[in-house]
Amino acid sequence: MSLIVPAIFLLALAVILPLYAMYFISLHRFGKEFRQFHPGLYEKLLATGRPSLSPVNGNYRAFQAIQSGKVSVEALNPLVLSSYRLARKRLLLGLSCFMVLLFSGLAISLNK
């Protein structure tokens, strides 16, 4: 038991960094496809909120709009929907891996 939890911690640490990098790449691809297939909707989403120079912020606003239901999933292009699902999957995997990292770190600190 004493070596299992630190091994889980190290494994989660090794997995989380590439997973979040893959998420941000997927989010960028999603935003690029969203702008390409739905330029009017993308501009409308950017207009509702604080102005930002970062394209990642606009991509995340579009991602959040779909997630919260402000944008109908049925109205989206299949490529946009596919990239949205991939980005969401990678985000959820990253969050799950972060929780494993957090709880294993807490377990290690409690055992000392």
Image (tube, rainbow, N blue to C red):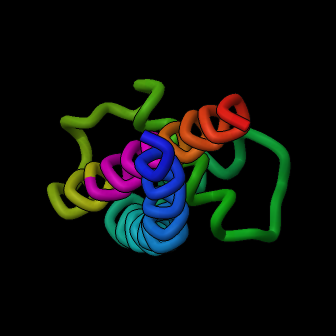
Residue 41 on image: x %, y %: 47, 49
Secondary structure mostly seen in the magenta stretch: helix
Residue 14 on image: x %, y %: 49, 69
Q: Quadrant of the N terminus?
A: top left
Residue in the picture at 60% in, 33% down: 107
Whether residue 69 appears in magenta in the rendering, the answer is no
Left or right: residue 52 versus residue 43 is right
Stretch in magenta? 86-97
Whether residue 95 appears in magenta in the rendering, the answer is yes
Residue 16 on image: x %, y %: 50, 61
Above or below, 17 against 90 in this view is below
- Residue 95 seen in render: no
Residue 13 on image: x %, y %: 54, 62
Residue in the picture at 40% in, 73% down: 29
Above or below, 6 against 73 in this view is below
Which residue is more in the foreground, 8 or 32? 8
